[in-house]
Amino acid sequence: SQQGEEDPQALSIQEGENATMNCSYKTSINNLQWYRQNSGRGLVHLILIRSNEREKHSGRLRVTLDTSKKSSSLLITASRAADTASYFCATKSNQFYFGTGTSLTVIP
Amino acid sequence: DTGVSQNPRHKITKRGQNVTFRCDPISEHNRLYWYRQTLGQGPEFLTYFQNEAQLEKSRLLSDRFSAERPKGSFSTLEIQRTEQGDSAMYLCASSPPDGNTIYFGEGSWLTVV
């Protein structure tokens, strides 16, 4: 079974607003990653946060990690219509497990 | 194009037929992964290789599924006696030796009719 669970399952916002997605996982991790998937396409790596890091930024992306709560969040600031996609968190122990994803729709 | 390459991109087959998908990983990536994804779900792990060795297989990989990576480069995933429940997108990914990030291909869509 998958280790990660994203919340919410679906999110719809207006362009320019911020989008926050959460991920909870079950076991100890070496790192946690977020991926993006456009409809019908492969997944694209967005950002990696290591287990000893608490926050990381990349452009309009901000990721936090709370290993005590086994949770992570992905914040996309100033969203654009092109951000419309599904977002997955992935945890790595021996290999990578993905959550069920958050489907983000950004309305122009 | 130096990304992960998968083919065919789409395959429609009749139930009971065999299908084979091929994955060419990024050069010098020694790890190769296969995942299956159905609509509205995240990728489900099937199996992974380090070089030519198949190190882990999911229980999702029934006896009808077999994966190979004979020379530690490209890999094939074969599904024998396909069933309608096999309809999904099959994703291949590879990672470098540090193994911290995996890079996906565009996937191979299978429709069993």
Image (spheres, coloured by chain):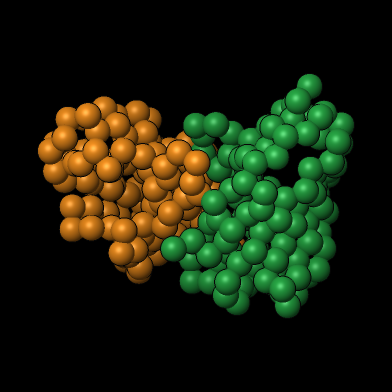
Chain colours: A green, B orange
A106 relative to A91 in the view: left or right: right
Q: Residue A79 falls in which quadrant of the image?
A: top right
In the visual, does B3 lie left or right of A16? left
Q: Position of residue A22 (x, y in %)?
A: 71, 56
Residue at the image point whose x is 38% and y is 30% from the top: B9
Measured as percent of width and height from the top left, residue A102 is found at: 63, 45
> Residue A96: where, in percent of width, then height?
51, 62
Give coordinates of residue B7: x percent, y percent. Answer: 35, 34
Quadrant of res A17: top right
Q: Is residue A52 left or right of residue B97?
A: right
Q: State the image quarter where residue A10 is shown.
A: top right
Decide if residue B82 is on the left or right side of residue A101: left
For the point 58% across and 71% down, the residue is A26
Please give the name of the residue rendered at 81% of the width and 29% of the height, measured from the top-left corner.
A14
Whether residue B16 is visible, yes or no, is: yes
Comparing A57 with B23, the one in front is A57
Q: From the viewer's perspective, is residue A82 above or below residue B21?
A: above
Along the viewing direction, whichever of A105 and B56 lies nearer the viewer: A105
Residue at the spot 16% in from the left edge and 35% down from the top edge = B15
Taking depth in this image into account, of B2 and B48 the one nearest to the observer is B48
Q: Is residue A57 above or below residue B9?
A: below
Q: Quadrant of the C terminus of chain A?
A: top right
Q: Quadrant location of the N terminus of chain A?
A: bottom left
A14 up-or-down from B38: above or below: above
Would residue B99 be visible to someone looking at this image? no
